[in-house]
Amino acid sequence: MARVLVVEDDPLVRSALIGDLANREHAVRSVGTALDGLRELSHHPPEVIVLDLGLPDLDGRQALRMMRAISPVPVIVATACDDESEIIRLLNAGADDYLVKPFSCEHLAARIAAVLRRNGARGGPSVLCVGGLRVDLAAREASLDGRPLQLSRREFDLLGYLAARPDQVVPRRELLSDVWHQSYGDDQTIDVHVSWLRRKLGESAAAPRYLHTVRGVGVKLARPR
């Protein structure tokens, strides 16, 4: 069971989502406006938010930015737009996943389960330790040998995903799908973020300690030898 906040202005859609998620043993709270959603987020923190972008009081993208400014809780946006560039903007603005309307309750339930797995809200530890590296998934904080690391959102997502799979080579396609939420993309995106992470971990591609690139396969986070 997870705490789910549904922000949806259509009462029929909201009622259907509440009923289905409750039947799946989720604890559901729901509101019809962005401002009410922000209040709920502050007073009754959920584990995941389902955010409709067509709200009556605030633009959905503005609501997403405001939610992301006050909480690291994962957000799944529901949008009527299936334009790739718009979806990329939403993901870069802080969305963890997206659904294009119309969608089924089964599809939403599967996306919620996937987001919770990625964020450590269900199953598995919320604090990951690999050597001197510590990653707190719930607090979205990371440190190396007791020193806090200043990471961007995507850097943290990448580090957390790899830290949950220590000593395992993660294929690039899996990283694009589960970290960048893209079915395809440029491998250079991954290489750039790995390079940035390496600098913040005080290492280099020529002398890696934690981050290892396996040419033609993927990336591995390993304990230093």
Image: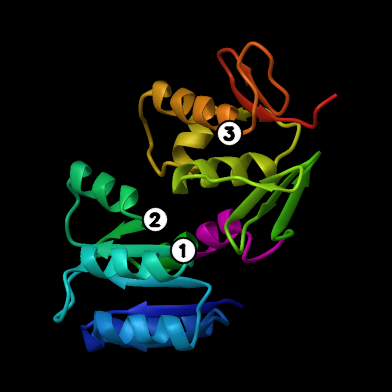
Q: Which amino acid, by three-letter code, is at mark 3? A: Lys
- The answer, for residue 175, to whether it is visible in the render is yes
Up/down of 76 relative to 177, above or below: below
Q: Which amino acid, by three-letter code, is at mark 2? A: Asp
Membership of 113 in magenta stretch: yes
Looking at the rendering, the stretch of residues picked out in magenta corresponds to: 112-123
Residues at marks 2 and 1, CA–CA distance in whole angstroms: 8 Å
Task: Name the residue at the right extreme.
Answer: 225
Q: Of the residues under marks 2 and 1, which one precedes in the sequence?
A: 1
Q: Nearer the viewer, residue 160 or 140?
A: 140
Residue depicted at 54% across the width and 40% down the height: 158
**Quarter of the C terminus within the rendering:** top right
Task: Determine the main secondary structure of the stretch shown in magenta.
Answer: helix
Residues at marks 3 and 1, CA–CA distance in whole angstroms: 25 Å
Membership of 33 in magenta stretch: no
Name the residue beneath numbered marker 2. Answer: 97
Q: Please tell me the numbered disc located at residue 74.
A: 1
Tag 2 secondary structure: strand
- The answer, for residue 19, to whether it is visible in the render is no
Residue 122 screen position, x and y as percent: 65, 66
Decide if residue 78 is on the left or right side of residue 212.
left
The answer to whether the residue labelled 3 contacts the one labelled 1, judged by CB atoms less than 8 Å apart, is: no
Up/down of 88 relative to 222, above or below: below
Name the residue beneath numbered marker 3. Answer: 200
Q: Of the residues under marks 3 and 1, which one precedes in the sequence?
A: 1
